[in-house]
Image (cartoon, rainbow, N blue to C red):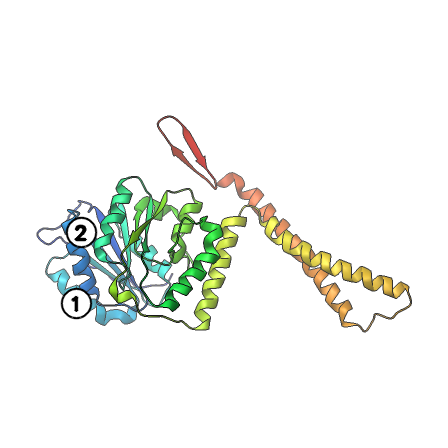
């Protein structure tokens, strides 16, 4: 990724952090509808200090948010533990998170969007869940008091991804999350899958929990996006569904589609053959072209699935698709 990043070294309020790692790395990705970052920092810092946690604040922003970053630079001069990184061009939220992860030193990473979704005081609940053994804790805005259109969009998204979460994640779009750093380092961070990190963690066998949190008053306004955004998100969900369900068995996906096409095309061709034997002409009928097209597409889809199966087979010995979690009395293998 061709980006230019600038960073300021973190310091605590009273003395330099030096080599001492903080308890929490707070990562703020600034990519859409940002609010005052200085106010967000002060609110979050007051909460974490009230909990007795040391922290570092890492802000990763697109290049056109320089004005929003200026107040943070003033806080850095006052000794606040803040780092600022800016990309040389606009990139996705996942790329911003990957850049910030390289600067995180704490064992726990707290991700926040550049706008309020839940009351900042609720982050203590997420951190407590991590201390009790969870690997990944995502906030769930509950109860929801925002506009009806927002709740409808959330329900539609939940309905689509429920087969992947088995009903365990209700607010996957919430960006307030507490994650063990080693979990983030193991998850594949690429594309536009940042909002689906809880699903990736579930798929990889990590302990993922959802914590009900009070919704922030500033997160109540209705939001409707352009058709292109909804289409891209639908494509992302379809891509995620394929990666989580069929990465190791691509023939089941492509073979099913190919079999339907090939069967439909074959049935139509047999029907046309019977008519031709009966003396009817079929050379100029569009149905003949459609049946041949369906049959060829089906065979190609099946062949693509077979090629995918061969690639998976030859790469199976180079890596594993599961984690082994050790317990005092037994070992549990998680697929």
Q: How many marks?
A: 2
Element at label 2: helix
Element at label 1: helix
Residue 88 to residue 261: above or below: below
Q: Position of residue 278 (x, y in %)?
A: 91, 65
Question: Given the current orientation, which residue lies at the most extreme left position?
Answer: 14
Q: Nearer the viewer, residue 107 or 165?
A: 165
**Pair 1/2: label in front:** 2
Residue 325 to residue 151: above or below: above
Question: Given the current orientation, which residue lies at the most extreme top position?
Answer: 329
Q: Position of residue 290 (x, y in %)?
A: 73, 67
Mark 2 is surrounded, within 10 Å at the Cα level, by few (under 14), some (14 to 19) or many (20 or more) other residues, namely some
In the displayed structure, does residue 27 sit left or right of residue 257?
left
In the displayed structure, does residue 308 sit left or right of residue 279?
left
Q: Position of residue 24 (x, y in %)?
A: 22, 49
Q: Nearer the viewer, residue 104 or 243?
A: 243
Q: Nearer the viewer, residue 83 or 286?
A: 286
Q: Which residue is mark 2?
A: 48
- The answer to which quarter of the image holds residue 4 is bottom left
Does the image show residue 83? yes
Label at residue 71: 1
Q: Nearer the viewer, residue 212 or 260?
A: 212
Does the image show residue 304? no
Alpha-carbon span between mark 1 and mark 2 = 20 Å
The residue drawn where x is 47% and y is 57% is 159
């Amino acid at each position: 990724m061709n980006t230019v990043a600038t960073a300021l070294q973190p310091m605590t309020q009273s003395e330099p952090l030096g080599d001492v790692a903080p308890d929490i790395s707070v990562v703020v990705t600034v990519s859409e509808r940002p609010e005052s970052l200085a106010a967000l920092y002060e609110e979050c810092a007051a909460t974490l200090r009230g909990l007795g946690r040391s922290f570092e604040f890492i802000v990763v922003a697109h290049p056109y948010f320089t004005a929003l970053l200026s107040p943070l630079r003033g806080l850095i001069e006052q000794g606040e533990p803040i780092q600022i990184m800016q990309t040389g061009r606009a990139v996705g939220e996942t790329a911003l998170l990957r850049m910030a992860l390289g600067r995180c030193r704490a064992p726990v990473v707290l991700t926040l969007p550049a706008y309020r979704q839940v009351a900042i005081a609720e982050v203590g609940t997420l951190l407590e869940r991590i201390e009790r053994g969870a690997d990944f804790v995502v906030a769930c805005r509950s109860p929801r008091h925002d506009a009806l259109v927002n709740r409808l969009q959330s329900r539609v998204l939940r309905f689509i991804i429920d087969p992947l979460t088995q009903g365990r994640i209700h607010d996957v779009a919430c960006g307030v999350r507490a994650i063990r750093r080693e979990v983030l380092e193991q998850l594949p961070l690429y594309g536009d899958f940042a909002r689906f990190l809880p699903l990736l963690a579930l798929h990889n066998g990590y302990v993922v929990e959802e914590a009900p949190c009070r919704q922030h008053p500033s997160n109540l306004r209705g939001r409707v996006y352009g058709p292109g955004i909804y289409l891209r998100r639908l494509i992302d969900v379809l891509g995620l569904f394929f990666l989580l369900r069929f990465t190791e068995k691509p023939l089941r996906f492509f073979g099913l589609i190919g079999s339907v096409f090939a069967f439909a095309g074959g049935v139509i061709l047999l029907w046309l053959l019977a008519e031709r034997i009966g003396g009817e002409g079929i050379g100029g009928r569009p149905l003949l072209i459609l049946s041949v097209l369906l049959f060829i597409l089906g065979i190609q889809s099946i062949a693509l699935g077979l090629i995918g199966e061969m690639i998976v087979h030859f790469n199976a010995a180079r890596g594993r698709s599961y984690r082994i979690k050790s317990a005092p009395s037994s070992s549990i293998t998680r697929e």
